[in-house]
Amino acid sequence: MILSRSLAEKLLILANGGQLSASSLKHTFINDLIAEGIITDKRSGRTKSTLQVINPDALSKYLFNKFSISDLQQYVNLLTSTEITRAKLVQVASDSKSISRRTFKGFLINSYEPIETVLNDVPLLINPVSGTFQFIYDFDKFIPAPDVIIVGVENSENFSEIRKQRYLFPNSKVLFVSRYPQNQSKDLIKWLQSIDNPYWHFGDYDFAGINIYIQEYKRHFPGKKASFFIPENIEKLIEKYGNRKLYDQQQLNILDISEENIRSLITLLHKYKKGLEQEALILSL
């Protein structure tokens, strides 16, 4: 059992001599504390009931024995902190898993040429060796050079083979970021919102790809910060490599689309009645 922040805060009020209504502390183990004589239940009338700690030392021992909490005040302070680490949890609650904490934050990046960035106020040149990626953990302090365009790659194979798609970005300095693993995507959105660099979404050229861009990315970026990347030869690619099943099995969830290039893409999808998977661009040199 894990002692929640809400319950811990209420217990702290009682431990410091305060009182709370019984209705605000309905929990199984509160009944145990009453039975142990640690908390008293004072009733006034038929329904009104007030809880109060009558033995603070006994409460401290109980919390330590049941939850390994050595200091209730420090435990509450930690739960209200934005910097919760497993090391601190061990110190306060003797258990790094006493709180659900995602420690593996951040996202993957890739590039086919050196990209100047700054990480924690220190210059960092992004230049992964072919066959490797880099993972940015401390993304809150990761800042690309102003002339760098951030390109979000929807599919993992395209992200892995980004050097074979260099022809798509001939006059741009680009830093590629991966949409996967998908549980990291919130970190990516948060980072993109914190920097001034433009964002190009590079995904599948079908209705599902458009939906992903608008629902997962565009809605977070007002104005012209985000755009859907479409290569100049997209019509030939759809005609040659397009898949009829993608057109037949998908539908567009968003009908009010402001980007002219996406509206033009939709026209092409209807014209050829095909959708194009992003992986086709790896082959189209």
Image: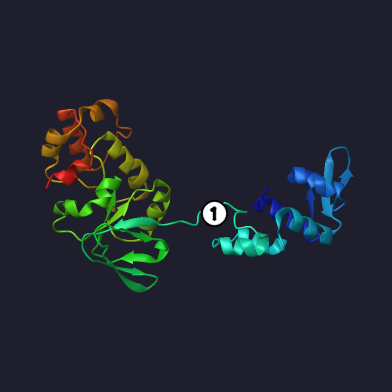
As drawn, 128 above or below 23? below
Identify the residue at the far bottom of this view. 122
Residue in the picture at 28% in, 39% down: 209
Picture quadrant of residue 134: bottom left
Q: Locate residue 242 relative to residue 36 in the image: left or right.
A: left
Residue 227 lies, in percent from the top left, at 26, 48
Residue 189 in sight from this viewpoint? yes
Q: In this figure, which residue is indicated by the disc labeled 1?
A: 101
Asked which secondary structure carries label 1, the reply is loop
Task: Name the residue located 22 percent from the left edge and 42 percent from the top edge.
Answer: 279
Left/right placement of residue 183 relative to residue 239 reads: right
Question: Can residue 154 be spotted in the picture?
Answer: no
Residue neighbourhood size for the residue with mark 1, other residues' Cα within 10 Å, grouped as few (<14), some (14–19), many (≥20): few
Residue shown at the point (20%, 27%) measured from the top left: 244
When the figure is inspected, residue 219 is found, relative to residue 108, above or below; the finding is above
* Residue placed furthest toward the top: 248
Q: Relative to 12, does residue 264 appear above or below in the rendering?
A: above
Q: Residue at position x 46%, y 56% from top?
A: 104
x then y, percent, for residue 219: 36, 45
The amino acid at mark 1 is Arg
Residue 228: x %, y % from top left: 24, 46
Towards the viewer: 207 or 86: 86
